[in-house]
Image: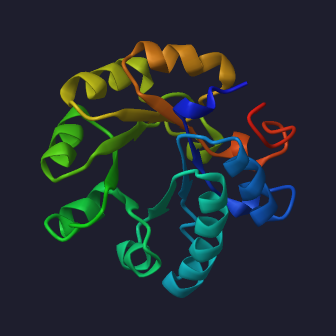
Amino acid sequence: MYTFNRLLAVTDRTLCTEPFLERIEELAACRPAGILLREKDLEEAAYTELARQVLAICARHQTACILHSHPEAARLLGCPNIHLPMGLLRQMAGTLEGFQKVGASVHSGEEAREAQKLGASYLVAGHIFATDCKKGVPPRGLGFLREVCRAVSIPVYAIGGITEEKESLVLAQGAAGYCVRSGVMQNSLIDKPGPEC
């Protein structure tokens, strides 16, 4: 079983084998480090409505919810956490006041240092291992993760092909934790909600 307080759960409702909000309810009850509402295919209005529902579920379970790429939706809904791709972080630097947590996705030590200077409070670095999400794209590996962790003083979360068996490998490189997408969206991970997770 994953160590939930090290886990950032990345959503993808297309992978769910049950209704998406039921999956969020089960997942939030396990109290991961956070639930990152990614859902990149949604237009802002639809994303905002889904985020409203997910935030309500997370609040019931006192689980952090992080919105992705939509800072205006986050402000509208009172969500203090936002995650941005590096390009958006560059565009929005200096306009993100009021957020408690600002995450950024990085792909090199240089990007990691830049993101920290631009105000990121945590990073997601990847992809570390081969993953279906990036079919045919070679993984960057553990050496890359170690480089990113050493380049910055803020928490780094690894992403990409991280199974329960590989958890210790990424933590050994200095990562604060790791992101999982398909594992948390499918029935294979969570048998029952609550502190037993």
- How many numbered circles are shown? 0
* In this picture, residue 77 sits left or right of residue 192: left
Q: Nearer the viewer, residue 44 or 78?
A: 78
Q: Does residue 7 lie above or below 39 as drawn?
A: above
Q: Quadrant location of the C terminus?
A: top right
Residue 189: image quadrant is top right
In the rendered image, is residue 42 in sight?
A: no
* In this picture, residue 66 sits left or right of residue 71: right
**At which x and y percent is residue 55?**
58, 66
Tell me the residue at 44%/78% (across/down).
73
* In this picture, residue 90 sits left or right of residue 172: left
**At which x and y percent is residue 36?**
53, 54
**At which x and y percent is residue 15?**
75, 55
Tell me the residue at 43%/35% (across/down).
157
Q: Does residue 151 lie above or below 95 as drawn?
A: above
* In this picture, residue 106 sits left or right of residue 90: right
Q: Quadrant location of the N terminus?
A: top right
**At which x and y percent is residue 64?**
52, 52
Q: Which of 42 and 119 is in front in this view?
A: 119
Q: Does residue 167 lie above or below 25 as drawn?
A: above
Tell me the residue at 13%/66% (across/down).
94
In the rendered image, is residue 86 in sight?
A: yes
Tell me the residue at 42%/19% (across/down).
142
Q: Does residue 71 lie above or below 134 as drawn?
A: below
Q: Which residue in the rendered view is the most extreme toward the bottom?
A: 45
